[in-house]
Image (cartoon, grey):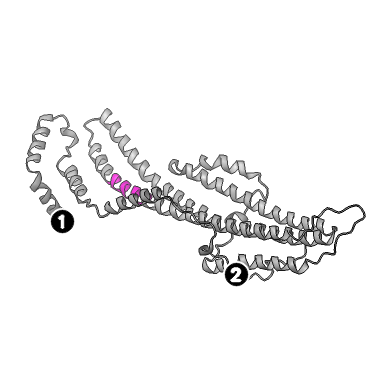
Amino acid sequence: MHRTYSMRQSRAPTASQIQNPPPPSSSTKAGRFFGKSNVGHAFRKQTAGAFGPDLAKKLSTLVKMEKNTMRSMELVGRERMEVAQQLSIWGEACDDDVSDVTDKLGVLIYEIGELEDQFVDRYDQYRVTIKSIRNIEASVQPSRDRKQKITDQIAQLKYKEPNSPRIVVLEQELVRAEAESLVAEAQLSNITREKLKAAFTYQFDALREHSEKLAIIAGFGKHLLELVDDTPVTPGETREAYDGYEASKAIIQDCEDALTNWVTKNAAVSSKLSSRSRTLSQRNKDRRAQGEGVDLSGQDSSMKDRESGLWVPADKHGEQGEYEEGSEEEEEETPASGHRGREAGAVAA
């Protein structure tokens, strides 16, 4: 293919790349155990959820499936470039108009292949961000397992040795494990929402840019087709000499300028919500705004009561009457005891 009119000859950054710098090359393009073939697709998909913590298995499968998707997109991009070259080779032996137009069409199709290669790099940002959620899930699993293990040990001891002094120690460990688990679960919830929005923002931004540029190339490709004279001729009749070389070159240059100067704010397609969707979305935002600043100090007070007043040693589990009397006295003194408990905790600290 004649690369004289290649849109990637100068390699100057486009306006979109200046506004939003491209990410590094995709991690799926290197370090392949099975080479560039697709032999490993089924293997990765089937073994993704077989290892690692239970909490992260589903997301691990998703990450591996997205890796397979990116490998497939890389293959499509490479084969599209080869198709562009073959189209130009075939048209070289045809008439002048077909030869020139097929050569320019090959340039456009080759550009589509390069755009798909760039799309893979941006798509990898989405996959890596989803992968970070998986890592957080894997880090939360040990705290869940520890809390469940302590709970099982307490249940087993209460069944076999109800008066064992180890029950008291395990109950204290369970309180600490529950506190650690609450922190880990809150962190997982916050990071999951943050990373989920960031990941799909990467994907949808990349899809939007890629689709807009494909539409630009398709439009200029149809302009090139207008240069082909498809008027039927009778046997022995000759067609007029082709003089569209400058026109085809100008179309390619216009296409290059349109791709180079494209930015997000110039997108031709916009997604506008209906009035009902806008109302429901705004209502959801208002509800979230009203829920901000909730006072959770009451939870600490109830935890104090649980640790100090409601806890009963293991050797007194059978004295039900004493337990009920103590609980009634504590209910009568609830307003003052909670205050004294905080003061005592502060002095101890």
Task: Name the residue nearer the viewer: 98 or 318.
Answer: 98
The amino acid type of the residue labelled 2 equals Pro
Residue 244 counted in the magenta span: no
> Total number of numbered labels?
2
Q: Residue at x 61, y 66 (%)?
A: 258
User: CB under 8 Å between callouts 1 and 2?
Assistant: no
Q: Position of residue 142 (x, y in %)?
A: 39, 45
Q: Determine whether the residue tagged by mark 1 lies in a helix, strand or loop.
A: helix
**Residue 346 shows which numbered tag?**
1
Q: Position of residue 31 (x, y in %)?
A: 62, 54
Relative to 37, residue 318 above or below: above
Q: Amino acid at mark 1?
A: Ala
Based on the displayed image, in which of its 4 quarters is residue 4 positioned? bottom right
Helix, strand or loop at label 2? It is loop
Q: Residue at x 59, y 54 (%)?
A: 28
Q: Which residue is mark 2?
A: 13
Residue 266 is situated, as x and y percent measured from the top left of the image, at 53, 64
Quarter of the picture holding the C terminus: bottom left
- Judged by depth in the image, the label closer to the viewer, 1 or 2, is 2
Q: Which residues are magenta?
A: 176-188
> x, y percentage for residue 190?
36, 52
Foreground of the two, 252 or 345: 252
